[in-house]
Image (tube, grey):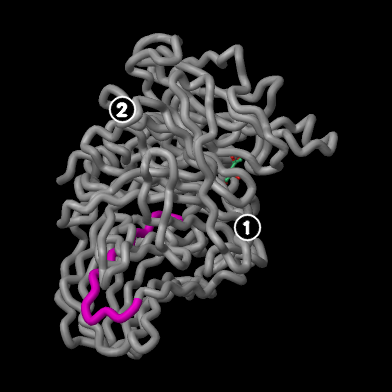
Amino acid sequence: MNPSLKKQITSYVLVLICGLLLFGCKDVNQTSEKIVLEESIKIEKYRPQFHFTPKEKWMNDPNGLVYNNGTYHLFYQYYPDSTVWGPMHWGHAKSKDLLTWKHRPIALYPDSLGYIFSGSAVIDNENTAGFGKDAMVAIYTYHDPVKEKAGQIDYQTQGIAYSLDDGETWTKYKGNPVISNPGIRDFRDPKVSWYEEKEAWQMVLVAKDEVQFYESKDLKAWEKISTFRFDDKPPLGVWECPDLFQLKVEGTEEEKWVLIVSHGGNSLPNGGSGTRYFVGDYDGTTFTTDQKESQWIDYGTDNYAGVTYNNEPNGKRIFIGWMSNWNYATTTPTEKWRSAMTLPRELQLIKIDNKYLVKSKLVDGFEAITEDISKEDLEGNFPTQFQYTDLQQSIIAFNAKINNKLQIQFSNSEGDTYSLGYEKAIGKFYTNRTNSGNVNFNENFAKSSYQTMPIGIYNNMKVTIILDASSIEIFINDGEYVMTNQIFPNSNFTKFEVLKENDSKIDNLNIRKVATIL
Ligand code: FRU
């Protein structure tokens, strides 16, 4: 048995024994009470078991994604006093494998310049800023609520802070802000990385409806070098959380640059907030693209504000997004905490029919925390139903040879259903969470029940579905197209069904249990 699964089962047995002790005896012993409390987080309704969640209270965007000395750091927008958004801090967690996380103390607190909004982190190996060799430097947005309330528009500026102990404790730079507000209301979310050819730090920053590029030798003095705009008709909602990086087209020597931007309002084709990308060229100053229309990192409603790791040791582009949507994020039916991150995904660039596509592939290493439940060969055998004790913590993969329609459904004993499928005639993949349980906590959630993604004509496809308590992530062909959804079923899904409308052939169905790694 996989060691982490063994550990998980042992801990469940411990909880059970401690539970019996607690409820069965009058003399409750302190130690068992503590174990029960620590374990209780794992049995909270809707608490993901292998996605990152804050122990308690509100979380939104991933921030400061940086790898240093064997550790991946995940900072995040955090409000420790409530389960709804408020004065922003940077929460902090660390991981060796991007899957198992250790919670760390809050890294950055609001100060007299404002709340600490989203941003990035770099490792200053050459001590360019003078904070110390190998200092971890965070570059973030200050959002000044006092100025905002006073009706001024220049309330967002950029600040920096540094840590000399691997992100445990932080000192804010005395010369903050390092970039003042030029009179633009939305001016935020700096992503900084090292640009080798110019031996300089470069920053992408959103300013209303454009991305601005800045450069600096020391992380303190910044000069604006260019601007990127895209002619959206009609305009999309507010521009947020940009990122810029280079990728090689898979299987070739062709190098391209990818610019990511998240958009609020009702920008995503399926409603609410979404993240799009542009593939183009960058000459060290200016980004250009021939792309004519928006392409989205994820077509599901629940992957927002995602950015990628700096300094990833294997040269991979690892992306993490916030698994929610501003259209209903503050009202999701969880009690002690709100929101989770997506599973980390490796972004890869491919070219299909002369079109560039950014693929989101599940990170290597995920298999290690899974264990087979069943393998079935379904070819030519419909309709088919499989009953399991629990599918809410599993990865389900199959190949489909598409005739006309693919129709799959998950359900539970309460009659809740979540379905997904593909209609070849119109080249659309869809998900349907209309009857998936609690959908009425917010009318915007209910409105986005049926979601589609235009993937074009496929004769064969590999479908990978990852279910974790209140989330479902669907990867087509290892991430050529992705849909991420939150769901709140009344009880765990136990049935996997190939519906009778289906006329495609499905084989190699493999269902694996995923370990609890909170
Ligand atoms: C994106 C965002 C960012 C901002 C942060 C505030 O979700 O709106 O633009 O920095 O959240 O929490």
Q: Nearer the viewer, residue 294 or 331?
A: 294
Q: Is mark 2 within 8 Å of ligand 1?
A: no
Q: Is residue 30 visible?
A: no
| Upstream in sequence: badge 1 or badge 2 | 2
Q: Residue at x 31, y 58 (%)?
A: 359
Q: Is mark 1 within 8 Å of ligand 1?
A: no
Classify mark 2: helix, strand or loop.
strand
Give the foreground label among 1 and 2: 1
Identify the mark at residue 272; answer none if there is no mark.
Answer: none
Residue on which disc 2 sits: 71
Identity, as a three-letter code, of the amino acid under mark 2: Thr
Mark 2 Cα within 10 Å, few/some/many (few <14, many 20+)?
A: some
Q: Position of residue 71 (x, y in %)?
A: 31, 27
Question: Horizontally, is 218 left or right of 144 in the view?
Answer: left
Classify mark 1: helix, strand or loop.
loop
Q: Residue at x 51, y 62 (%)?
A: 301
Question: Horizontally, is 54 left or right of 378 in the view?
Answer: right
Residue on which disc 1 sits: 237
Q: Nearer the viewer, residue 24 or 162?
A: 162
How far apart are the two marked residues, 1 and 2, measured between alpha carbons? Answer: 35 Å
The magenta stretch is 456-470
49 over 91 or under it: above or below: below
* Viewport quadrant of the C terminus: top left
457 over 371 or under it: above or below: below
Identity, as a three-letter code, of the amino acid under mark 1: Gly
Q: Nearer the viewer, residue 18 or 97?
A: 97
Secondary structure mostly seen in magenta is: strand
